[in-house]
Amino acid sequence: MKNVKLYTLSTCPWCLKTKKFFKEQKIPVECVDYDQVSPKEQEKILAEMQKYGGGNSFPFVIIGEDAVEGFDPERFAELLGVV
Amino acid sequence: MSSQARKKALRFLFQKVVDPLGYKFSPDEELVEFCLEQEVKLERMHGIPYCPCKAVTQDRRENMKIVCPCIPFHREHFDAMKRCWCGLFVHKDVVDPDKLKQLPENKVKRG
């Protein structure tokens, strides 16, 4: 199974939907709320998001080698191979 | 000011800003209430009602681009989605916001 990492915000409704999606699919994820970590950690997160071509928008989901910016359950399922 | 009163004030203020831009509050009232609630929290924390779905950074200039309503700073991107990133606002002709997807800015075709 591919590793899944979620970068989210505690204030973002689409991040909550994203967390719910992976919970319902029973897929283990590593999840970090950007707004709940130190400024230094935040810089690292933004740098990683930018490495994947992302900006400053959440949710940001890394599935294996691919990344998805935004809540896109169809794309999540496709990358997870659960279509 | 209570959270409820501040949400009401933000609704009043935002309505006047987004209307001339061709946008309105999403018909999804639950989403609107949630986003406004988060913006009130962010305003209490930072002094500014930032977008609840964008990263507040140490860069004040960049942060100004995510002050709600941030439509003017992301016009091409949001117009392509017919909604803003968090979905608080949608184009005036939108009836069913559930049909609108979040598209990454780099996936939006530039004309």
Image (tube, helix red, strand yellow):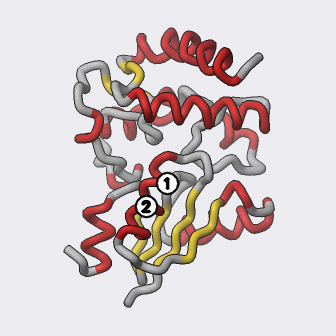
Q: Are marks 2 and 1 on the same chain?
A: yes
Residue A46 at x, y percent in the picture: 63, 63
Chain of the residue under label 2: A
Judged left or right of residue A76, residue A12 is right
Residue B25 at x, y percent in the picture: 41, 22
Camera-nearest residue between B79 and A34 = A34
Chain of the residue under label 1: A
Q: CA distance from mark 2 to mark 1?
A: 6 Å
Query: Which residue is at 32% across, 25% downward?
Result: B91
Query: Which residue is at 59% across, 71% downward?
Result: A48
Q: Is residue B80 above or below residue A43?
A: above
Q: Secondary structure at mark 1?
A: helix
Q: Is residue A36 above or below residue A32?
A: above
Residue A42 at x, y percent in the picture: 71, 62
Mark 1 belongs to which amino acid?
Leu
Packing grade of label 1 (10 A; few <14, some 14-19, many >=20) is: some
In the rendered view of the protein, which quadrant contains the N terminus of chain A?
A: bottom left
Mark 2 belongs to which amino acid?
Lys
The single residue placed furthest to the left in the displayed view is A83
Q: Which mark is residue B74?
A: none
- In the rendered picture of this protein, how many numbered marks are placed on residues? 2
Residue B71 at x, y percent in the picture: 48, 29
Q: Label 2 belongs to which residue?
A: A20
Q: Are marks 2 and 1 in contact (CB under 8 Å)?
A: yes
Judged left or right of residue A77, residue A20 is right
Q: Secondary structure at mark 2?
A: helix
Q: Is residue B11 above or below residue B76?
A: above
Q: Label 1 belongs to which residue?
A: A16
Query: Which residue is at 43% across, 32% downward?
Result: B30
